[in-house]
């Protein structure tokens, strides 16, 4: 649990640094700069935006999740479909989680990581 908390905190701080930095190059790690300089084919190559990196991560994680679901529950998915058993309460939880993610993105964009931590802690105490 301690390791999960530390890695979550470090990733939040790094993400905030990337989002709030004035230039993407200032927040790019040294190893990434070296890799880009080797792979750069022309001087007009632009750095990868945060949105493009999010799309890359979403694509790869979706593929991994689909393969895992197919391996574990492939027969059930073929017979009943991928969304079998989703009741209205499950859809409500999914909607609440999505709204929570959007609220977190708004807090990161307009506040700082420390405020996000206090808001998360407060919401845990209240719920």
Image (cartoon, grey):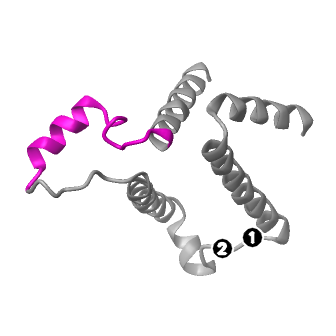
Q: Residue at x 48, y 34 (%)?
A: 17
**From the image, which quarter does the N terminus lie in?**
top right
Find numbered disc 2 in the image and state the secondary structure of the residue it sits on: loop
- Which region shows up in magenta? 20-41
- The x, y position of residue 96, in whole percent, is 78, 58
- The x, y position of residue 114, in whole percent, is 67, 28
Q: Residue at x 30, y 32 (%)?
A: 29
From the viewer's side, name the closer residue of 73 and 123. 123
Find numbered disc 1 in the image and state the secondary structure of the residue it sits on: loop
| Residue 30, picture quadrant | top left
Name the disc covering residue 66, or none: none
**From the image, which quarter does the C terminus lie in?**
top right
From the viewer's side, name the closer residue of 35 and 71. 35
Q: Which residue is mark 2?
A: 83
Q: Is residue 24 left or right of residue 91?
A: left
Q: Is residue 79 left or right of residue 85?
A: left
Alpha carbon separation for disc pair 2 and 1: 6 Å
- The x, y position of residue 3, in whole percent, is 54, 22
| Residue 34, picture quadrant | top left
Magenta residue check for 31: yes
**Number of disc labels:** 2
Q: Residue at x 84, y 71 (%)?
A: 88
Please, is residue 101 above or below residue 22 in the view? below
What is the crowding at mark 2: few (fewer than 14 residues within 10 Å), some, or many (at least 20)?
few
Magenta residue check for 44: no
Q: Is residue 69 left or right of residue 107?
A: left
From the viewer's side, name the closer residue of 81 and 59. 59
Q: Badges 2 and 1: C-beta atoms under 8 Å apart?
A: yes
| Residue 23, picture quadrant | top left
Please, is residue 83 above or below residue 124 in the view? below
Q: Which residue is mark 1?
A: 86
């Amino acid at each position: 649990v301690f390791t999960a908390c530390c890695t979550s905190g470090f990733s939040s701080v790094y993400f905030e640094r990337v989002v709030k930095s004035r230039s993407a190059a200032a927040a790019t790690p040294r190893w990434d700069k070296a890799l880009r300089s080797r792979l750069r084919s022309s001087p007009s190559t632009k750095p990868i935006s945060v949105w493009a990196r999010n799309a890359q991560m979403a694509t790869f994680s979706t593929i991994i999740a689909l393969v895992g679901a197919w391996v574990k529950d492939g027969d059930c998915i073929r017979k009943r479909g991928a969304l079998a058993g989703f009741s209205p309460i499950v859809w409500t939880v999914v909607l609440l989680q999505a709204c929570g993610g959007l609220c977190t993105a708004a807090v990161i964009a307009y506040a700082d990581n420390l405020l996000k931590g206090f808001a998360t802690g407060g919401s845990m105490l209240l719920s």
